[in-house]
Image (cartoon, rainbow, N blue to C red):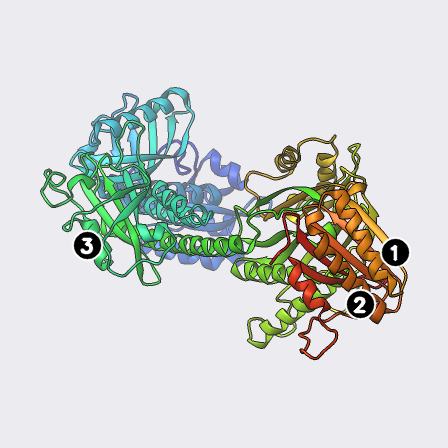
Amino acid sequence: MTELSESHDDPFAPHLAALAVLDDRGVVVGWNRRAQELLGHPDTAVIGRPALEVLVDPPDLPAVTEAAAKCRRAGGWFGVLTLRHLDGQPVELGLRAHGLSRGDRGREWFLAAAPAGDVLEWQRDRAVLDGLYRQCPIGLVIHGPDQRILRVNRAIERFSGFPAADFRGLSTGRFLLADDARKAVDRVRQVMQTGRPLVYSEQFVRLEQDPARERVALVSSFRMEDPSGRVLGVAEMIEDITERHRAQRRLALLDQVGSRIGTTLDVAETARELAEVMVPHLADHASVDLLQAVTRGEEPTRAVAGPVVRLGTCSVGAQQPGPPHPEGHPVEFGPDTPQAGCLADGRPVLEPVLPPDWVSAAGRQGAQAPDLGAHSLIVVPLAARGLVLGVMTLWRSRRPDAFETDDLTLAQELASRAAVAIDNARRFTQQQQTAFTLQSSLLPRTVPDQSAVEVALRYLPASAGPGLGGDWFDVIPLSGARVALVVGDVVGRGIHAAATMGRLRTAVHTLASLDLEPDEVLSRLDDLVNLLAAEHEAVGERPVGEQVVGATCLYAVYDPVSGRCSVARAGHPPPVVTAPDGQAALLDLPAGPPLGLGGLPFETRDIELAEGSLLGLYTNGIIGERHIDADAGLTKLCAALARPAGALERTCQAVIDALVPSRPSDDVVLLIARTRMLPPASVASWRLPPEPASAARARALTSAKLTEWGLEHLAFTTELIASELVTNVYRYAGGPATLRLIREQCLVCEVSDTSHTSPHLRHARTTDEGGRGLFLVARMTERWGTRYTREGKTVWTEQPLTGTPV
């Protein structure tokens, strides 16, 4: 770089600097007006006097004397000195001294001075300008008004590979490919015309001599003007950020993989997300192929090369054809293809440059390669826990640069992260299928036939979340034409919740067969849940003391003869009761503790339900998401059930449509029962005194009523049953007996008394005169049993209306 000429900003310029001349003895012989302005001394006061005497304070004399000695030795000096103003104040000046030879008159010293701040600022500006051209790592290009290059710095030499001198006089973008050159020209023209600078404009740069290598530059441009406003050109600062851009792109890809992939726990969706992340950031075309076993949630066999299913594809550009084989279709890889080898040994494949005939080469890729002019290929395995789940294939056709080793490393990292998500989705699918199969086998498949209520129900498993829940329902026919309606919800999700649900449902059936009161049923369920929790703690499944099993339950028993419904709940939402006129309200029912707390009481409430009333039982899933206020959900449920009587199935579906989202996050159970009443003509009841004649009276009443009902073919067996049961009351209970006959889907014969003594079936010996009554009852009926009430017990029997069982 040649020495720059002095400019008007040079503080030592003759018209700006303070000038003085000293003879060889240090006496002032010359003094200009600027010197008088800076130091306050007029020329008449200093000329002819020693400079040290007039201009220097004693404390500053050593520094000035040392500078004078250096100046004499070197013939000149430059630096900063402190001189004295006329008013006595110190003044810091930047001072430049040059020796002048006057022949026989000796030597004189020419001094130029300026304020130290101005001198230092000027020096810094000269250093910055020199550094921009010689040392700055950021490229500098100076364009003239005609958009020809005037000068570049050494960083442009390193960036382009051309000497700086070769750029002088060339048009903007001369060494770039046409597309990149056009963008550069447009940018310079825009700044030249508008005067608005462009800051950090990112541009892809490809040189004519190396078109396959794509670089990225960060360009800042501004217009240059002289003091009069004349445009001198455009200056551009150009920084090569290729490696930074690649690093940012890789970090962005890794971030996308972490944020986008694996959020759904769906194998196919995860594969599609992976393909979409790859394009266009890393590849022009991508496909994700998984082993068929993986798509079914099964664990793949080691070193298996197929068959595979293409679950994810993506290509750049709407007009660009993608890889063959649409998503969801099976794919067969030839034995010599990179994909087959990658599946077999789990090793990645990098082919930076593909030959022109690579696609059509026999046995090489066959129909699996996209006919896209692909010139570079990467195949990486999708492996997790030591198992290869599939392969990801990447092609480049539009981008000129080939895949590099760094691209392969990045693709492996992305594939590794995605494979973990895919394997999690696979295992989740497997667990979901197992849990769903288990749960489906444990839930009732059909509603049993009974005449007490008309039932409509919906069960919707959760479509999101970790596994199925433990919600269950039941409709259990009871003796005396009654029916038990049950809904429950086990805490937790997955197989354990489904298994626990099955155990509780079995227990409810067993307890229902004992005809216990609802509060008693819940009390015994509570004992069972505590027992299950203790078993889990004993085998170390959870820390001792932590609740491992819990559930809520609602148990209701409806009697169509009396219209009475007995309900108790254990921490479960209360049922909704809709009157025949459409008025709906929550049943005021004590909440009761959830099952598993132990030792806390439950309470049964009896209510009278008019015929045609709706009883709505449900689980938490129908009220709404967990972040939604439960009271608001209950209000919506009551509103959905407050409607005139209509088809029960339509009512049930309307409630689901109004309250349940398309993808519920929790299992949903809705059971709606419309009450029925048995006609009074189908029920007959008599109270019999505790005397031997009551047995004969029971036979006569039974025979007459069955004749009235047209069931004469059941008269003999029913007379015998009634006679035996009434006789047992007389012999062992000691109080009055109540005989009741119910005609519905079967013939029910009941005998009630005030005793809680349980009758036992036994085999009488041949010499015994009694003990055969219950044995005969059991032989002649389809079902029989005993239920207990607060007043005593009832022994009941059921016979089919079509005939007497053998």
The residue closer to the viewer here, 247 or 157, is 247
Task: State which tag comes first along the sequence, 2 or 3.
Answer: 3
User: Left of 414 or right of it: where is 771?
Assistant: right
Q: Amino acid at mark 1?
A: Arg
User: Left of 27 or right of it: where is 779?
Assistant: right
Rendering quarter of residue 460: top right
Circle 1 crowding by C-alpha within 10 Å: few under 14, some 14–19, many from 20: some
Task: State which tag comes first along the sequence, 1 or 2.
Answer: 1
The residue closer to the viewer here, 772 or 732, is 772
Rendering quarter of residue 543: bottom right
> Percent position (x, y) of residue 565?
79, 49
Circle 2 crowding by C-alpha within 10 Å: few under 14, some 14–19, many from 20: some
Q: Amino acid at mark 3?
A: Gly
Q: Secondary structure at mark 2?
A: helix
Q: Secondary structure at mark 1?
A: strand
Asked whether the beta carbons under mark 1 and mark 3 sit within 8 Å of each other, the answer is: no
User: Left of 670 or right of it: where is 90?
Assistant: left
Asked whether the beta carbons under mark 2 and mark 3 sit within 8 Å of each other, the answer is: no
Q: CA distance from mark 2 to mark 3?
A: 84 Å
Residue 632 appears in the figure = yes
Mark closer to the observer (1, 3): 1
Q: Amino acid at mark 2?
A: Asn
Q: Residue at x 47, y 48 (%)?
A: 263
Q: Which residue is mark 2?
A: 728
The residue closer to the viewer here, 10 or 32, is 10
The residue closer to the viewer here, 397 or 727, is 727
Q: Which residue is mark 1?
A: 687
Q: Secondary structure at mark 3?
A: helix
> Percent position (x, y) of residue 402?
20, 43
Q: CA distance from mark 1 to mark 2?
A: 15 Å
Task: State which tag comes first along the sequence, 1 or 3.
Answer: 3
Q: Which residue is mark 3?
A: 341
